[in-house]
Image (spheres, grey):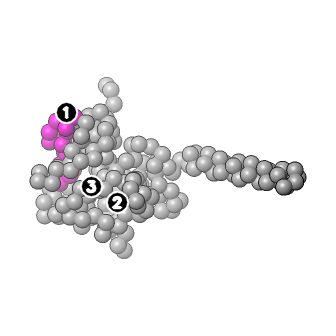
Amino acid sequence: MCACRRQVLGAGVAAALVSLSGRARAEEADPNREARPKPGDQFVFFEGDRQGQVITPADLKLGVTQIQAWPYDPENKVARDGSRLNQMLLIRLDPASLSDDEKPHAADGIVAYSSICTHAGCGVTAWMPQEQLLLCPCHGSEYDPKDLGKAVFGPAPRRLAALPLKISGGVLAAAGGFIGHVGIAPMT
Ligand code: FES
């Protein structure tokens, strides 16, 4: 290969890298990624084989453990994954088991919460199927997803922040913003 060809290839690779890093910077700087969920936001899988794919109502099976998710802004086609405070969990429950306070915020038995534990900020990633309670594995706090995420056991000082849901045209989406404080309580 002549020297001039190598120079042209080298310039091409350099331009591609500049373009990629520019795009990465643009994604990092996108304020939609850090914004809290808004009405109309959908949800995408947080991890696993389907990471980044939109979650449908059919993905949520009754009585099965929660799905970890990010809110997804369909208008700008961006997951709101720029802040850990946007980590969500979705779970489908028997609609008849929901408290009167919870019912207006559920969609066909599906409920959504911040997955950040209000004790010390770990992920609420476990499910207790017999008790129908969410569990934080760090220090054992338990939350009731049937009753607006109420803290029912352990050191958590208060409930999980809830996100109202709706299903419209078969699409699962947020019906409002967070109810309650997301994450650990600020020091007073
Ligand atoms: Fe969840 Fe301590 S961080 S119980």
Q: Quadrant of residue 121?
A: top left
The residue singled out by tag 2 in the image is 175
Helix, strand or loop status at disc 3: loop
The disc labelled 3 sits on which kind of residue? Gln
Q: Quadrant of residue 29?
A: top right
Q: Label 3 crowding class (10 Å Cα cut-off): few <14, some 14-19, many 20+? A: many
The disc labelled 2 sits on which kind of residue? Ala
Q: Is mark 1 within 8 Å of ligand 1?
A: yes
Q: CA distance from mark 1 to mark 2?
A: 30 Å
Q: How far across and down, in percent of the image, does residue 91 sit? A: 25, 58
Q: Is residue 147 visible?
A: no
Q: CA distance from mark 1 to mark 3?
A: 21 Å
Q: Which quarter of the figure is the C terminus placed in?
A: top left
Q: Residue at x 37, y 69 (%)?
A: 171
Work out whether mark 3 precedes mark 2 in sequence or the reverse, and give the earlier one: 3
The disc labelled 1 sits on which kind of residue? Pro
The residue singled out by tag 3 in the image is 66
Quick one: 153 or 20, which is closer to the camera? Answer: 20
Whether residue 126 sits left or right of residue 82 in the image: it is left
Q: Which residues are magenta?
A: 139-154
Quick one: 59 or 29, which is closer to the camera? Answer: 59
